[in-house]
Structures are given as structure tokens and as C-alpha cells.
Image (cartoon, rainbow, N blue to C red):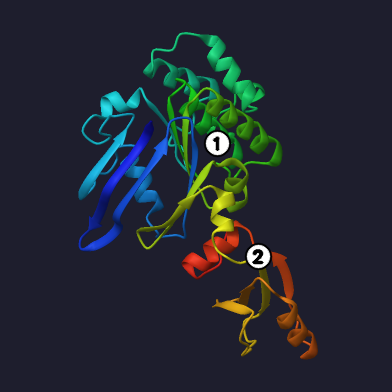
């Protein structure tokens, strides 16, 4: 059963197409990641999911609710953590959590205590928001998003400011959500963490969905096993087994299944190079034509 559904969704701004006839579903109980460069349409998609923006055409549903026209119903279904959380500078952590709890009619102090402990802010509950670090502000935003135990979580860049300990605690919490058959939608630049956490990943570029599958299948389906990287100013004309070459502003990348001949040529010309097995960053590189910057 689809928790999030996009059907031929387009979003235009003054003639510019930010999202171009995108269709996809996120299943109930799935952790789904959306990856793409800046300006690819990721943020617009997240804003339409939470009802902040109306699509120019197409249909969107979140748990069978129209997010733009049924925002009141949507509020009880989803939890939203943005890249920033707008709170009064002089509000205390505990006051912010209690305020949001009142919005959802949450009277149990046990839920508040659990989340403060889970995200490492139990000893900071009396601290003013303005005195929190950027990572602590992000953790507070996660607490506020998870407070009412939503069926669907929408997270924008959730890993960007977390230290390793906080990140692992958050991973464990999201895996617990999955076990409870809840849905998690992550908009992220962190391809490494998305690879570890997500059941499926969508790659978006210039408003179009380029690919969508499990991380393992995305890597398998690119058709190459090895990537050889050389400096950007290196030029090499060689036929098989090099079957794909990508030039960027930083490097030249050769994708191949049989690297021996290419390595021999590079060594003979005293050319610096590195070799590695392909991974999810290479899927992005081949589809988008540029490096993915975490």
C-alpha cells in the first residue's frame, strides 16, 4: 500500500519547470531517500508532500490525503523536520517540546522524556534555543517532528549536522519506525548514509526522476564493476574494454568491467590514477554527469 503517491506531477514557476511529470510511490513501512544536486527539484517535491506548495498538474496523496487541500487532516498523519526549525530564540528546549505537544493534545510526559533521552537533549532541556549548537537545534527539530508518533516522517537533510553518536541514535530510531510499519521520506545530500539506511532511492536531476530502485539494484544495473579516476587534464583514446567515460571539472572517470588494459596504458604513461569498485556515487555520476557532493 502506497503511503506517498505522485502521479504525473509537474510544478512550474513563471515558466520554469522545477518538477517535470514525476510519478513514483513510497510504500507503507518503507524508508525512501531522494537524492539530487542543488536545483534538481528535491525541495519542491518535499514542499508539495507536506502541503506547502500546490502542484501545477498531476495528483499527490499522502496516506490517501490530498496534502494541499486537506492540510488539517495531514497534520495528524505526518511529522516534518526541515533543514531549519523556526523557534523563538529565548524559548527553552523543554518549553518548545511542551508547546508542540499541546498542538497535538499530547498529555503523556513519558513520550517527551523518551524523545529527549533518545536524541540526547535530556540534559539540555532547560537550555535556551539560542544557546544550542546547530546539531542540537537539528536534534530538537527531530523531536518536534516525531512527538505525535506520526505514520509518515518527512525529513530534510536529517544527517547534515549530526555527530556520529547522534547519527547512530537517529538511525536506530528510524529503523524502529520501519519495524512499526511507518514510512520515512528523506531528502538528503548524504549519499553514504542514504545507502546504509534506505530501502529504495530515487535520483532526480533537472526536475526529472532518472532512476528509482534499491541501492544494491541501482549499482548492479549500471553495468560496470570498476571505476578508474584520472586528473581532469588527462586525455586517453582507447577502445574496449573502456565503454564509458565521464569528464567533470575535477576528474576524468573511466567505467569498465575489464580494467587490466587501461591500467597497463596508464602505468606505461606514468599517469596517476585510482581504481575502485563502483558504488552509489557512481550511479549518480553516470546518470547526472557530475560528482555528488555530500
State the residue in front, 34 or 122. Answer: 34
Task: Nearest to the eye among marks 2 and 1: give it.
Answer: 2
Q: Is residue 212 above or below residue 174?
A: below
Q: Residues within 10 Å of mark 2 (few under 14, many from 20)?
A: some
User: Which residue corresponds to the image point at 54% horizontal and 59% vertical from the top-left?
Assistant: 221
Q: Estimate the x, y position of residue 110 in percent, counting from the top left.
A: 56, 10
Q: Which mark is residue 137?
A: 1
Quadrant where the N terminus sits is top left
Residue 133 visible at all: no
Q: Is 16 or 289 nearer to us in this picture?
A: 289
Please indicate whether residue 205 sits to the left or right of residue 20 in the image: right
Residue at 63% from the left image edge and 24% from the top image edge: 118
**Is 284 above or below relative to 6?**
below
Give the residue at mark 2: 225
Whether residue 195 can be seen here: yes
Q: Percent from the top left, x then y, of residue 5?
A: 33, 39
Amino acid at each position: 500500500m502506497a503511503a506517498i503517491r505522485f502521479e504525473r506531477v509537474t510544478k512550474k514557476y513563471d515558466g520554469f519547470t522545477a518538477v517535470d511529470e514525476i510519478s513514483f510511490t513510497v510504500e507503507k513501512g518503507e524508508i525512501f531517500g531522494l537524492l539530487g544536486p542543488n536545483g534538481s527539484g528535491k525541495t519542491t517535491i518535499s514542499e508539495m508532500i507536506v502541503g506547502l506548495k500546490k502542484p501545477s498538474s498531476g495528483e499527490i496523496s499522502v496516506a490517501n490525503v490530498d496534502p494541499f487541500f486537506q492540510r488539517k487532516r495531514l497534520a495528524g498523519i505526518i511529522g516534518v523536520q526541515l533543514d531549519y526549525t523556526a523557534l523563538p530564540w529565548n524559548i527553552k528546549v523543554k518549553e518548545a517540546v511542551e508547546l508542540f505537544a499541546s498542538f497535538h493534545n499530547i498529555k503523556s510526559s513519558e513520550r517527551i522524556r523518551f524523545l529527549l533521552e533518545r536524541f540526547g537533549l535530556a540534559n539540555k532541556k532547560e537550555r535556551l534555543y539560542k544557546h544550542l549548537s546547530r546539531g542540537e537545534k537539528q536534534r530538537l527539530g527531530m523531536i518536534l517532528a516525531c512527538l505525535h508518533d506520526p505514520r509518515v516522517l518527512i525529513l530534510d537533510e536529517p544527517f547534515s549536522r549530526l555527530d556520529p553518536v547522534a547519527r547512530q541514535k537517529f538511525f536506530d530510531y528510524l529503523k524502529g519506525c520501519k519495524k512499526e510499519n511507518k514510512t520515512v521520506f528523506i531528502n538528503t545530500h548524504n549519499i553514504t548514509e542514504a545507502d546504509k539506511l534506505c530501502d529504495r532511492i530515487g535520483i532526480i536531476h533537472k526536475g526529472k526522476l532518472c532512476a528509482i530502485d534499491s541501492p544494491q539494484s541501482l549499482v548492479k544495473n549500471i553495468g560496470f564493476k570498476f571505476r578508474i579516476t584520472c586528473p581532469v587534464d588527462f586525455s586517453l583514446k582507447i577502445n574496449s574494454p573502456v565503454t564509458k567515460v565521464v569528464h567533470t571539472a575535477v576528474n576524468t572517470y573511466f567505467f569498465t568491467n575489464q580494467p587490466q588494459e587501461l591500467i597497463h596504458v596508464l602505468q606505461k604513461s606514468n599517469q596517476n590514477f585510482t581504481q575502485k569498485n563502483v558504488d552509489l556515487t557512481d550511479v549518480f555520476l553516470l546518470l547526472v554527469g557530475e560528482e555528488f557532493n555530500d
